[in-house]
Image (cartoon, helix red, strand yellow):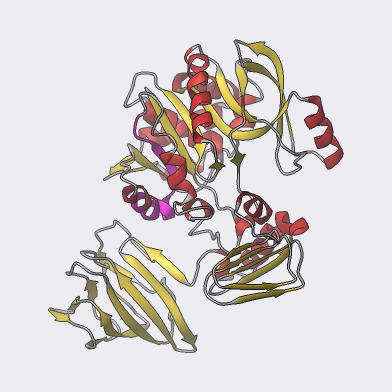
Amino acid sequence: MLIPVILSGGVGSRLWPLSREHYPKQLLALVGQNTLLQDTVLRLKNLPEIAPPLVVCNESHRFLIAEQLRSIQINPEHLILEPEGRNTAPAAAVAALAAQNYDLDPIILVLPADHLIKNVAVFCAQVEAALPLAAAGHLVTFGIVPSTPETGYGYIQAGQAVGKSAFKVARFVEKPALALAQEYVAAGDYYWNSGMFLFKASRYLEELEKFAPKIFGACQESVYGATQDADFMRLSKQAFLNCPSDSIDYAVMERTQDAVILPLDAGWNDVGAWSALWEVSEQDAQGNVCIGDVLTEATENCYLRSEYRLIAALGMKDHIVVETADAVLVAHKDYVQDVKKIVTQLKATARQEADLHRKVHRPWGTYENIDVEERFQVKRIQVKPGASLSLQMHYHRSEHWIVVKGTAQVTRGEETFVLSENQSTYIPLGVKHRLENPGKLPLELIEVQSGSYLGEDDIVRFEDVYGRHAG
């Protein structure tokens, strides 16, 4: 059995301000209608004897990922929830241990959730070609045939031939300077490191136990102590937090004698920076990528993306401009790898623009901050049909709700009642309350909060259908 393992724990900070800590790039539709996560799963459908995917993700993304998979009619075997990221080696390990519950010794295909592959047929053909290698006990990685001397990727040197089209891994090399990257491309036996792998679950775990026993032990303990919550597998928190952080490359692939590389030329891109997204997007006659409400004059080779407001670009060349509701990025293409330095500054000053968009997604729907001043804020709330917020109360704020679309069922203290469009209610400070949408259409309302403290952590939950405890 072939079990796909989708690693969806990344943040994609170089694609800020679109990618945020709580809404990372794999959950965004950056190229086409589907998100990168959805495309990653959908490209597997033509592989032989393919099982439902195992998805390893951050606990805070679980509902977003589940919803995105449901929308494309994919039912994952499990969503394995990491209490905190520990890099790819532990993520692959817990997935391999979980996969052995469904098959005695499955082959697992480890894929990052945030890559772009244009030629899906070639990708699937190479995965099929790699299956006999994995079945024979090799640990296969897919090396991308380089099109340019890229300095943003690591490289893998191919060694002795294995079979018709694979090679022993001679060595892994870090991201090189330009001159060295040019030498690698000219040599013809170096490939970009894709971070995609194929191997038997047992072989990976054997090599991990040999070369990184602390990772293996912690992952084994975290899976054996895991709890089941619907489609979610919650790893034992303390056991996983004790796990060292390391990549599959460092922990296993650079040390094992059984690593092989299979070249792949399928229009791969890790969409790791805004310049990469410009390269893979459709450009106009001036080389510009214009998304949203954009006007240009005397502007060339730019990526211009408007989410809310008009962008007018005049006399610009080789620049990135990305506008969101609460932040605007302006950067020369030569500096896009440093966008994460801006995110680091945001985190250092505890600014929420690093973590959240103005519109925040919750399992029941969304809320969007419209206005914030001292002692009051205004939000627009949308609740999905049939969905319900938790039964909760606040110590420091009261709330006014005005229904603008749909029907709301309100629990306030001991009473329950229904509000229709243009009706409103008041929730006093300290009173238990719940908001539900009993209808078949989305519920939209305006919420006005007032009080001495308006933070999202001023929520005491008494009941919650989504298993949340605070915040």
Q: Quadrant of residue 393?
A: bottom left
| Quadrant the C terminus occupies | bottom left
Q: Residue furthest right?
A: 179
Q: Which residue lies at the image location 33% right of the left edge and 78% below the top edge?
A: 394
Q: Which residue lies at the image location 36% right of the left edge and 36% below the top edge?
A: 225
Q: Quadrant of residue 323?
A: bottom right
Q: Could you say where residue 336 lies in the image, as x and y percent from the top left?
A: 71, 57
Residue 164 part of the magenta segment: no
- Please say if 461 is above or below 403: above
Q: Could you say where residue 155 lies in the image, as x and y percent from the top left?
A: 71, 32
Determine if residue 22 is in view: yes
Q: Residue furthest front?
A: 285
Q: Which residue lies at the image location 49% right of the left edge and 88% below the top edge?
A: 373
How many dots with numbers? 0
Residue 55 part of the magenta segment: yes
Highlighted magenta segment, given as a residue range = 51-67
| Quadrant the N terminus occupies | top left
Q: Could you say where residue 404 lies in the image, as x and y percent from the top left?
A: 28, 83
Q: Which residue lies at the image location 77% right of the left edge and 64% below the top edge?
A: 317
Q: Nearer the viewer, residue 359 or 282?
A: 282
- Please say if 273 is above or below 388: above
- Please say if 407 is above or below 130: below
Q: Nearer the viewer, residue 358 or 277?
A: 277
Q: Could you say where residue 291 lies in the image, as x and y percent from the top left?
A: 56, 64
- Please say if 469 is above or below 412: above
